[in-house]
Image (cartoon, rainbow, N blue to C red):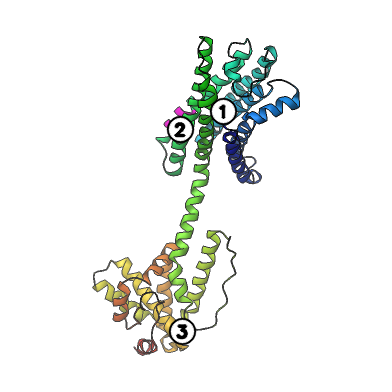
Amino acid sequence: MRNSDYYVPAIALGIAFAAKLPALRRGRHDPMVRSVLFLLFTAAICFFFAAPPTIAAVNRITGVTNLSAPLVYCIMCSFSCACLVLIVNWRGGPEERVRRSSRRWIAAYGAAMAALPLLFLAGDAGVERLRDFDTYYAGTPFIREMIVTYLVAHIAAAAVTVVMCLRWARAVAHWLRLGLVVLVVGLAFNLAFGIAKLTAVVARWTGRDWSTLSTTVAPPLAATGGLVLTVGFLLPLLGPRLTGVRRAWLTYARLGPLARYLRSAPGIRPPLPDIPWWAPAGLRLTVRETAIHDELLRLQPFLDDRVRQRAYESVLAGGAPGPQAVIVGVAAMVMAAVGSRGDAVPPAEDEEHVQAGADALTAALAPGRDRLVQLSRGMRSPLLTEAVRGAAAPSPPAAGQPPGPSPSQNAETRTR
């Protein structure tokens, strides 16, 4: 296996750890946050210290031949324990039960980690082996037990976590289920890594040389499994945020026609805030939504509920559903108001209809952003063409141009 096959996963996992590190300041007391960070950290340093150049450097710096072996094995046990503890906290339940299960796993793997350096000190591993330590010392007293201890601990953690994830995946949905499915795939790679290693060791006990399983087959399985596991653990945590960002961008784009149309009419209006290109979608959406509400507020003196009512009745008579007719009626009224504002002649003699139009607009847009999105879609609805005819409102513009009423149509609308 190439050295890059160790260092590339280590760098990728290190970047994921650094990206999640700020969450520790906000949730330092959250066991979920601590478990995720510890898992990412142990996975990253495990690949780093398992790379042959790092193994040689640690042995040289410490002056102890093969000291990297118990070091890497302890880190692997820490990673296995982190997987189990994270699953326990992730699954939830009564707080006391979660704590009790977490402590049991920590105690079990803590005992294994304490035994590894003791077995190493008791054994004799005087010949440095950078890539085939497991099979080379498979028959050496105490070193043999050290190797079997870390492999059994690794295989047990992978097998138990697979069973837990499969059981849990049947009861959940969406990002959590996807994360659990990815976890099962990653754990399958990790399980295959442990089985390949242990098979090579057992083969050496029977006099066979299957060291290729340990030196060539197992390391790529571990690299792939570590990356897939990390993705599986992060998906349920980052997935909802990704969904929120996607929805924010979609809503931002869907509000575009309404925002551009409201600002297309002549008149003096405050400039939009200067948003940097790296601004998040949520901020852009908030600014656009605020600008739309501000423009609708400025349109209030020009609203005419009679335009809305005639458009509503026209669309309803054409067979459109009631909710759709309501949105199209309000869209027709907004279009007429934009045209009237462009002429700077508010229909002062129709204050009753202005207030009724403002009330209808408020009722149509409340609550939430969905109604605002529906109004934006209504500005481009084919039904609006018939609606503005029935309401004597301006016709929609040609394709590619922002809709806008003509002066003659505005005058006709106001005189009715």
Q: Sort mark 3 into few (<14), some (14-19) or many (20+) by Cα contacts within 10 Å.
A: many
- Residue 166 belongs to magenta span: yes
Residue at 66%, 14% in the rendered image: 119
How far apart are the two marked residues, 1 and 3, measured between alpha carbons? 68 Å
Please state the horizontal and vertical placement of residue 53, each as a whole percent of the image: 66, 30
- Residue 212 belongs to magenta span: no
Q: Quadrant of the C terminus?
A: bottom left
Q: Quadrant of the N terminus?
A: top right
Q: Sort mark 1 into few (<14), some (14-19) or many (20+) by Cα contacts within 10 Å.
A: many
Please state the horizontal and vertical placement of residue 163, each as a whole percent of the image: 45, 27
How many badges with numbers are in the image? 3
Residue at 34%, 80% in the rendered image: 395
Q: Helix, strand or loop at disc 2?
A: helix
Q: Which mark is residue 184?
A: 2
Query: Overall secondary structure of the magenta stretch?
Result: helix
Residue at 49%, 83% in the rendered image: 266
